[in-house]
Image (cartoon, rainbow, N blue to C red):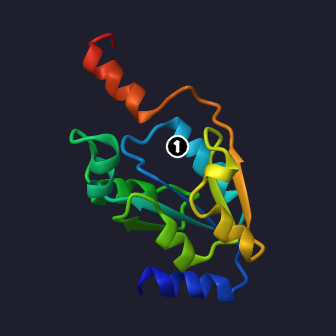
Amino acid sequence: MDYQEIIKSAKKEGKKIVFTNGCFDILHAGHVDYLEKAKALGDFLVVGLNSDKSISRIKGKCRPINPQNFRKKVLEALKPVDLVVIFDEDTPKRLIEEIKPDVLVKGGDWKVENIVGADYVTSYGGTVKTIDFIYDISTTKIIEKIKSGNC
């Protein structure tokens, strides 16, 4: 079954669809906390996962560290995640318009007005939320720590 059929089925069952997206390159506690909080906003959490090509365009030639199929497998194993969809574009705009989530979620480092797809989601009565980070950690910080040798 393809992801569109899975989402259609979840909607038919009356589930509240939550969508978020990201690279999720080196999974850490911040990611897990964020995904748990995102899932708490609804019944069915869809994670849009940047493809390897899109991450390289956005973050540079040395990224991602982990290939998309590995990142997808790890995300799918997490309890809050119901579905992972890989996208090739630099933004998840097309995917958001396809899925039409009830709730669109991004991290607290984003202003709602700058979240891709926010206007679209609110146009049909959906909501846009941001989630504050409680861990001072990121994939970039992990990579920098490893490179510096100050482990």
Is residue 30 left or right of 113 when viewed as pictured?
A: left
Name above or below for residue 27 compared with residue 74: above
* Residue 54 coordinates in the image, percent (x, y): 32, 56
Left or right: 112 as drawn, with respect to 35:
right
Quadrant placement of the N terminus: bottom left
Among all residues in the image, which is located at the extreme left? 61
Q: How many marks?
A: 1
Which residue type does callout 1 highlight?
Answer: His
Residue 36 on image: x %, y %: 63, 50
**Image position of 65 (left or right of 101):** left
Q: Residues within 10 Å of mark 1 (few under 14, many from 20)?
A: many
Disc 1 designates what residue? Answer: 31
Name the residue rendered at 64%, 56% in the picture. 105
* Quarter residue 85 falls in: bottom left
Towards the viewer: 33 or 25: 25
Helix, strand or loop at mark 1: helix
In the visual, does 137 lie left or right of 74? right
The residue that appears at 59% across and 29% down in the rendered structure is 135
Q: Report x, y in % for residue 73.
A: 36, 59
